[in-house]
Image (tube, rainbow, N blue to C red):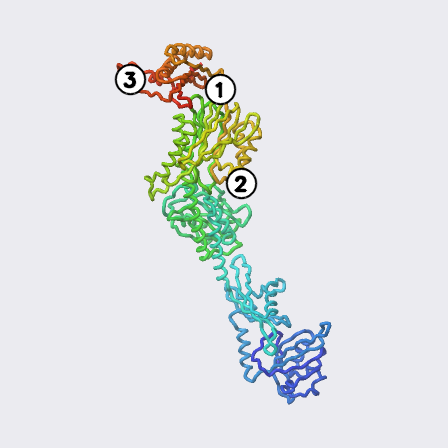
Amino acid sequence: MTASDQGSGHYGWSPDAVTATVGPGGIVTGWSEGARRLLGYRAAEVVGHAAAELLATRESSETAGLALIDSQEWSGTAALLHRDGHRVDVTLHAHPSLDGDGKPQGFVVTATSDTAGSGPDRKMMEWAFAQASIALSTYATGSRAWQLNAVASGSEPARKGAPRTSPYPDLLDGGHTDEGFLRRVRRVAEEARPMRYEHLTPAPPDARGHAWIIEMWPVRDPSTGQVCGVGTATFDSSEQHRARQRLALLNEAGTRIGTTLNVTRTAQELADLAVPRLADFVSVDLLDSVTRGEEPVPGPVDATVMLRRVAHQSRAAGVPEASVGLGKIDAYPAFSPPARCLTTGRPVLSGTDDPDFGRWVALDEARSSSVRTHGFHSLMAVPLQARGITLGVAVFTRSTTSAPFAQDDLILAEELAGRAAVGVDNARRYTRERTNALTLQRSLLPRELPEQTAVEVAYRYLPAGSGAGVGGDWFDVVPLSGTRVALVVGDVVGHGIQACATMGRLRTAVRTLADVDLPPDELLTHLDDLVTHLSSDKDDAAPNEPYAVTGEIGATCLYAVYDPVARVCTLASAGHVPPVLVLPDGTVSVVRLNPGPLLGVGGLPFEATELELPEGSLLAFCTDGLIEARDHDIGLGLDRLCAVLASPVPSLEVTCDAVLESLLPESPGDDVALLLARTRALHTDQVAAWALPSDPAIVADARAQAARQLAVWGLEEAAFVTELVVSELVTNAIRYGSVPIGLRLIRDRTLICEVSDASSTAPHLRRARTYDEGGRGLHMVAQLTQGWGTRQTSRGKTIWAEQLLPVS
């Protein structure tokens, strides 16, 4: 037997091992007793002679000699010559011995003889290695040489179109050696423990890549126990690798698709996730009704389909493949793959080999040009369906740089589309409910503020961002008698339809109580009673009515009444944020109130606070959504509001914008209501007042004084009605009221006549009988004036009547 190639396998080991030492020149320098028994030579016959003389063939001599001269370590098989002339087959291991400088000064050679019956077995082992159906290899640590079987080297006959069977041509190619693979091999040899290496082979344009698992284990010399090489076995794990990739993509879809309750954003998340891991280009088109939050017709879509493009994504920057722009409507003919999948409700796998694909592409020049330019050859159209409702279609395409879609890709796309459809449907339903709630909310808020003279107002109302839903914030401006005005701002705790509906009830209640002209503290007391009744009213509760207004209700409210004649503002708070006051000289402060409890607590009083305000003072009312956030409390928010209001601005509208820009994030987390009111004043040339004694004879004098004042104001045309009103109201005050009695005329947008007395008894209209001597006065006042009424005061009551001014 001749010496084998370096790194060949070793089989049939025998414990009968011998050693010898050889100098650098190949001269035997030492000979063991085991060597004598193996070859029959005594030490004196061998030491000093060339080791090559012991080899039975010339080829063995040349191979072993070169190995000992050029290698630091060598292993192989050889045929040795026995002293009596017969041949002995052995396995040789040559290990260098080093001097103090680390240079080889000789070799220790170990020889292991094969047993008599091991030859055929060893041959069979070698044949099994060479003919194995999996890729096997060995690496010799001494020579650093690789030995590959036919499968590993890729030299076995390959069928046309058959998959690759080995990664080794890529791993060991001299120009593209995989350093990671080689480092792992060295680690196995150094650490003497099995390891695993995974390798991905890049895919050619028209095929799929391969994944390989390479098992590695150390190979030991049985005689010394030292690691002399590494064995490897390679397995194709492409299917398992692709399965893991699909599972990873589906798992990621659970966290990346449907992160917001926004239809367009959810569709875009599907496209972003699928490119480039599943497709080269993805588009998502939805029924137009879905984008508006409407309920589509259940079941598949029929006939030619009109869809709106809401999302697309591409490997290339700028999505150059898109033939339809975002937000545009596109028509899909009934035979096109997208329309077919919508009609049947099942995904469609199509491509250039599908005649309908070619017909569809040819109908549109932009789509045809895109297909030609980018080489799209494979397409998957998957319907977006949730709860039995078709929402739209997702189209996945691959170009020349990718392999055609396979059936497992279609299954994966269907899973992704299903998850996206649930997210889109949730977002659609949320959009519908939010739109309905916002419509309700806006219908309950003032669209236009009523005309009044007491204050100049500006306001802003912002619904919460998409995460919170509609809330219960509200504001109002209510004209009162005597040119006064009520300024209201409130906030129902919570969000959603229930908070919105509660807000509508409270706003209506405040307007009703304001018409009665109650003082602010009394009005809040009545409002508190109402909220308490609403909280305890469970008669309307029904399990099938999720929007029924039941259960505990909490709300805050700030109610202020400003009198431009007295220039006094009276405020009362039910746990609401205090207003900010800006005086004409620029002084800014938070109004100090004695806030009462939240509405609905019940049993606790509310206190009123009076402020004398110079003309031109600015009051800023707001809800906590403007000044409270996660990173700061209400106190800091009020300080920031004061800082913004301290800066001079040309108008209240500009001030509103400046406040919102400075205090709010891009998407507020809570509803925001802001109401700014700059006070005005009615001067002495607009108001005339007289104190009257309780004497019926004074009625004629009161009429005369009113007529003279109207003449001064140039309102002689209103004298007849005014004198009648004065006569009736003063007569009633003298007859049924008590002193002091006062008469006041106010010239504003209308002419207002007020008569006050110290009695709290309010008059009422009644139908006078035919022969009754009284009871017709107030009825005439109601007929001749625009309106009349009574308000309670701290000193009694005031009866007022308002009439339009004559057109000049």
Mark 3–mark 2 Cα distance, whole angstroms, equals 65 Å
- Look at the picture and state if 290 lies above or below 36: above
Q: In the image, residue 372 lies at what x, y percent? A: 51, 49
Name the N-terminal-most of marks 1 and 3: 1
Q: Nearer the viewer, residue 717 or 286?
A: 717
Q: Residue at x 37, y 13 (%)?
A: 727
Q: Which residue is mark 2?
A: 632
Q: Which mark is residue 768?
A: 3
- Look at the picture and state if 645 lies above or below 35: above
Q: Is residue 675 left or right of residue 54?
A: left
Q: Residue furthest bottom?
A: 84
Name the N-terminal-most of marks 1 and 2: 2
Q: Is the N terminus in the top left, top right, bottom left or bottom right quadrant?
A: bottom right
Q: Residue at x 51, y 59 (%)?
A: 208
Q: Which mark is residue 682?
A: 1
- Look at the picture and state if 318 lies above or below 195: above
Q: In the image, residue 502 lies at what x, y percent? A: 39, 36
